[in-house]
Image (spheres, grey):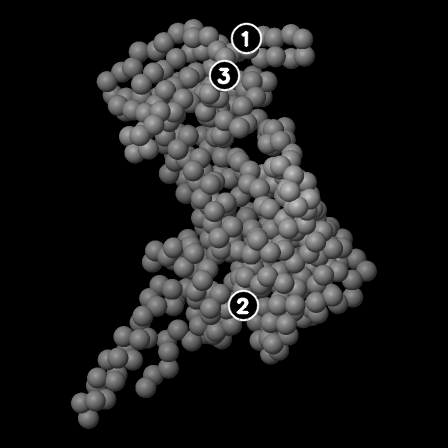
Amino acid sequence: MDKTTHFFGTSVFGQLISLINPQMIQEVSKEAGSDRYIKKFKTKDHLISMLFCSFAKCTSLREVSGAMLGLAGKTKHFQLNHIPKKSTLADANQRRDADVFGKIYHKLLKTHGAVFSDSRIKDVINKQIEIFDSTTISLFKDILKCVGRNPESGKHKGGIKVHTIINVDQAVPKMVWFTEATKHDHMLLEKLKMDANTIYVFDKGYNDYRVFERFCKNKTGFVTRIRDNAAYQSIETHELTDDLHAGVLEDQTIQVMVKEEESQRPLELRKIRFYDRKLKREFEFLTNLYDMRADLVAAIYKLRWQIELLFKQLKQNFPLKYFLGDNENAIKIQIYCALIANLLMTVIQKKLKKSWAFSNLVSFCKIHLFNYIHLLNFLENPDRDWQKMRIDEQQYALF
């Protein structure tokens, strides 16, 4: 009987790690000085160890170090030079600056960006659409101050807020910042670079008329929802043409007041009222895109759901409930490595012609992490060998 056609000389984990150029890791670590005075456990070993944690969904330092110690003879394909002990990994998570992992992530995004980019939306609108939002990850220790009431037990939990920007044509974050959970989302607005070729989409939690004024002055488009208690004055009601989507109920120019210390000044914006038949509810959108169709503005805001799906995908598929360290730096390293693992899995998903759910793909790789099968070939036709074996058995039975 023939051997499996999917057998490969490199493990699944080795194939995933091969998507990361070791020369790039060396350059980034040298630039950041993350290997200075380090004799054994270099940045690359640290990265591979934490990626193993992400793919294998390990929940403790002992689990990571113990599982990796059993990999003797299987590490040559991804050039792991030093398998860490529990104390070694704990010290590295505390001392090695998490920013080096952030730089590796952004280098990988630049390298593989073309694989999962989809320019269809940009071709229609002729502008780049960027979505931003934040998600809070609860911590079991009071490492970073969390939101919410004080518990009756008196034991406080911590929380880290992950502020994220994604391009609408990419399924992975473009930029990431970390703050304690009590930090207001407006922090992200201060970091935005105003660009006339970009439209920003965000939830009403970011409503700030002073920032909206900056958007208008820099000719940068935005789409958001108006607050329920917003005070405004209607200036003009625009006529709804027959070619518009039936869900568009109203299109107005309104005036809001931008307050600055003791003074205030008027700002004109566009408000669109839209009825979503699927959700059976009305939405009121706020924008400065006067030349765009009202129904297209509503469609652009719907794209914001992509970032919610990204947060759900990260939290469900990678270990972000149990952290290996009880310090801020270790937590940031683990989140960055989860982002890198998510990026690598997205590259694999986009390269496949066969449609795979992301969660099924992650589960498959976890089960077969150190099996020697050709990942892409197997995922394209996972039952090929089984069908071939059944045919061989039937032919053998004839004799």
Q: Earlier in the sequence, mark 3 or mark 1?
A: 3
x, y percentage for residue 95?
76, 55
Q: Is residue 158 visible?
A: no
Per the image, the residue denoted by label 3 is 230
Q: Residue at x 34, y 11 (%)?
A: 238
Left or right? Give the position of 280 relative to 98: left
Horizontal placement of 159 versus 312: left or right? right
Q: Position of residue 201 (x, y in %)?
A: 48, 30
The label shown at residue 266 is 1
Q: Assign a secondary structure to mark 2.
A: helix
Residue type for callout 3:
Ala
Looking at the image, is mark 2 or mark 3 earlier in the sequence? Answer: 2
Residue 164's disc is none
Label 3 vs label 1, nearer the camera:
3
Secondary element type, mark 1: strand
Residue count near mark 2 (Cα–Cα under 10 Å), binned few <14, some 14–19, many ≥20: many
Q: Amino acid at mark 1?
A: Pro
For the N terminus, the quadrant is bottom left
In this rendered view, identify the residue nearer to me: 209 or 227. 227
Task: Determine the CA span between mark 3 and mark 1.
Answer: 14 Å
Residue type for callout 2:
Gly
Q: Is residue 92 visible?
A: yes
